[in-house]
Image (cartoon, helix red, strand yellow):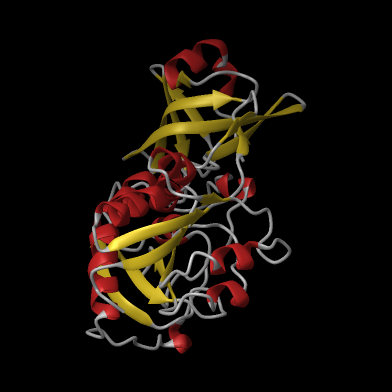
Amino acid sequence: IEINMIKTVFFGTPEFAKEFLATLHADEVFSIKGVVCQPDKPVGRKKILTAPETKIFSQENDIAVFQPDNLRTSNIAEELKKLEADLFVIIAYGKIIPQEVLDIPKLGTVNVHPSLLPKYRGPSPIQSTILNEESETAVSIMLVDDKMDHGPILSQQKMKIGNDETSTSLRAKAAKTGAPLLIDTIKKYVADKVKPQEQDHEQATFCKMLTKADGKINWNQPADAIYAQFRALIEWPGVFTIWKRNETKTTIKIHDLQISDKSLAPGLAQIEENRLFIGTKTKVIEVLELQPQNSSKMSATAFIQGHKDLNNTILG
């Protein structure tokens, strides 16, 4: 294949994927023949049908867009064959891609996975590394095979995870590190200057699809673990606790918190000078901003004004 032009089809849906798409599109070696992304989805309370970020970028740059509901049942494989691509690139597409599609490009399919593979294979690597209080992660560029995040690695670049890192900041770091790495790696791979390295499958660990239930705080954990949970799940689903007030249960979502040096029994809420403290297994969490169910976001101080009876109750 001539290195001066790599015909590429890009699979990816969210903002994170768009960062890579924009970098590929800006490099004259790549000719983006098409973008495959998930269908438009209803967003927000008003359920406004919203296009994925990669689709918006493609339309602005006159790139063909494909949004199949299902890659197995649609005739997408036939459509993609017509593009005669040398390479497919997958980043946060969000669906399993069948083998008959992966087999289309001459040079195979390259995937970017934001973890230190073989650790954290699966759908939530960024959140899971923070949740598990890891101090480092990586961007891994790999060839795709028929198992999840299992293919041989072409390159890997480590990244430090800061003490206050959130999934938002780590994702931005992964895009900034990963986009130039992807370009460089593909060019070397096409020129036969990089050899794919088999992963050590014995060392593989897996992360799961997150659910709303993952946001529930267990106050019997150490304060550091709760702070990690807050940072990991800040975008979705967020963290929450349950207050049994009289006979009704109220869900309280916590939007901002910090660790304080006091000590209280796990789950015990205490109001001091219009500040809200909750005990954990170790130190105490101070809640700075929260949102009771069916209400808007407010400071802890504002909440306390109308809910003094929270004092000395146990949250769960």
Q: Residue at x 51, y 80 (%)?
A: 145
The residue at the far right in this view is 247
Q: Position of residue 217 (x, y in %)?
A: 55, 45
Q: Is residue 174 visible?
A: no
Q: Nearer the viewer, residue 303 or 40?
A: 40
Q: Position of residue 186 (x, y in %)?
A: 29, 72
Q: Position of residue 182 (x, y in %)?
A: 29, 65
Residue 40 picture quarter:
top right
Q: Residue at x 56, y 57 (%)?
A: 94
User: Where the C terminus falls, by quadrant?
Assistant: top right
Q: Position of residue 300 (x, y in %)?
A: 45, 21
In-image side of 223 versus 308 (left or right) = left
Q: Residue at x 35, y 63 (%)?
A: 134
Q: Nearer the viewer, residue 73 or 31?
A: 31
Residue 10 picture quarter:
bottom left
In-image side of 276 versus 253 (left or right) = left
